Amino acid sequence: MEKHSKIFVAGHRGLVGSAIVRRLLRGGYRNLLLRTRQELDLLDQKAVFRFLDAERPDYVVVSAAKVGGIVANNTYRADFIYENLTIEANLIHGSWLSGVNDLLFLGSSCIYPKFAPQPMLEECLLTGELEYTNEPYAIAKIAGIKLCESYNLQYGTNFLSVMPTNLYGPNDNFDLETSHVLPALIRKFHLGKCLMEGDSGAVRADLDKNPVEEINGSSPWGDILTVLDKYGISLVSGDLSRVTLWGTGAPLREFLHSDDLADACVFIMENVCFGDTAAEGTKEVRNTHINIGTGRDLSIRELAGTVMRIVGYGGDISFDESKPDGTPRKLQSVDRLHALGWRHEITLEEGISRMYGEYAQT
C-alpha cells in the first residue's frame, strides 16, 4: 500500500472506522475516500456499485456494520443478519467488479463456537454451534470471511479478513439498550455516581447527550429515575445508588482498544497478503482470517470492579442471574498475529481511564 493510494473506509464514523482513519492519517495516507450514510447508503447495491465504479479506490476497508450488545443482537435478529449480509456483499462484490484488488474486511470474535477450545485458534471456525443470542450477526460475519476467501481463490484478489476481539474506545456506543458491555459499564457507573452525589445536573446533561427511550435532560425527574431503574441504575436512598448488571459476572472476555486495532489493521494492510495466511500444499484453503486481540482476558465481575474504581463509583453493585451470560469465554489466540510481527500496546486500565475521561468531558 502506497502513501498516495486511494483508500475507501466504509463506516468511517464508527468506533472501528474512525480509529482506522486516524491511524491512516498519522501514517501519512491522505487520499482517503469517506462517505456518510446520507451520502452513500451501503444497503443500496446500485448506489454502492456506482460509487466504486466511479471512484476506483486502490483499497477498500469494510468497517461498516450494524453492531450492538447482547440485548440488541437478540432482539433485532433479522435486522442484524440482513443489514450485515447486505453491506458486506455489496462492498466485496462491488469492489471486485470495479477492479479493486486489495480489501480488508473486519469481522468479530463471535464467529467462533460457543464452547470453542480456549484460546480460540482461527481453525476453530465452523467446528461447533454458535452462541444463540448473537447467532444471526455471527453468521453474517462468517459469510463475509467466506466471501473474501472465495474471491481470492476464484479471482486472485487480495481480500483479507481480520477478527477483532471485544473493542472499546473513542466514538463508542453508550446507548443503554444497544451498547456493548464496557461502554455500558462506564455509563452506568457514571450515572450511579452522579445519583449518589445528588448531582441531578450531571444526570440531566448525560441524558441530553444520550437520551434513553426518549427521556432526556428536560424530562421530569421522576421519569428519569424510572427509566434509569429499568436499565439497572437505581437510587436506593438519598445517598446510595445501586447498579445492576446482567448475568452472573462469571463470563471471561478479552478487550482491545480501537486505536490498537487500527494499528494492527494498517500493519496488515501494509505487510500481509492472502498467501501469507493460506496454508501451502493443501487442496482445501480455509480459515485464512487473522485474529486481533491481546491474548488476555478477565471476568465481567473483574471488569466491573476496574471500571468502578476508575469512575469513582462507591455504591452497591448486583448481578441479575436471571439474565443470560452469553458465551462463557471468548479469548482469541493471537499466535498468528504475533508471528506476523504485531502486538498490542494499550493496557486495559490505561484504555478505560482514557475512555472515561473522554466520555466525562463531552
Image: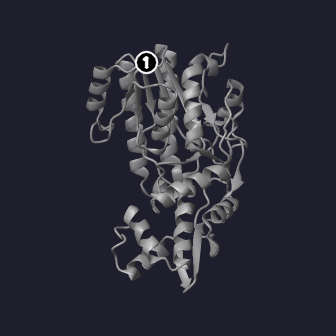
Q: Residue 127 falls in which quadrant of the image?
A: top right
Residue 2 lies left or right of residue 333; in this view the side is left
Q: In the rendered image of this protein, does residue 274 appear above or below residue 162?
A: above
Which of 320 and 210 lies nearest the eye of the viewer? 210
Q: How many tags in the picture?
A: 1
Residue 113 lies left or right of residue 226; in this view the side is right
Residue at coordinates 59% horizontally, 67% vertically from top-left? 245
Residue at coordinates 30% horizontally, 32% vertically from top-left? 45
Residue 183, given in percent of the width and then of the height, sits at: 53, 57
Q: Quadrant of the C terminus?
A: bottom left
Question: Which secondary structure lies at badge 1?
Answer: loop
Residue 62, given in percent of the width and then of the height, sits at: 44, 33
Q: Is residue 212 visible?
A: no
Residue 148, given in percent of the width and then of the height, sits at: 49, 26
Q: Is residue 333 visible?
A: yes
Location of mark 1 (residue): 4
Q: Residue furthest bottom?
A: 238
Q: Amino acid at mark 1?
A: His
Residue 168, given in percent of the width and then of the height, sits at: 55, 49
Q: Residue 58 falls in which quadrant of the image?
A: top left
Which of 292 and 29 lies nearest the eye of the viewer? 29
Q: In the rendered image of this protein, does residue 259 appear above or below residue 277?
A: below
Residue at coordinates 64% horizontally, 61% vertically from top-left? 310
- Mark 1 neighbour density, 10 Å: few (under 14) some (14–19) many (20 or more): few
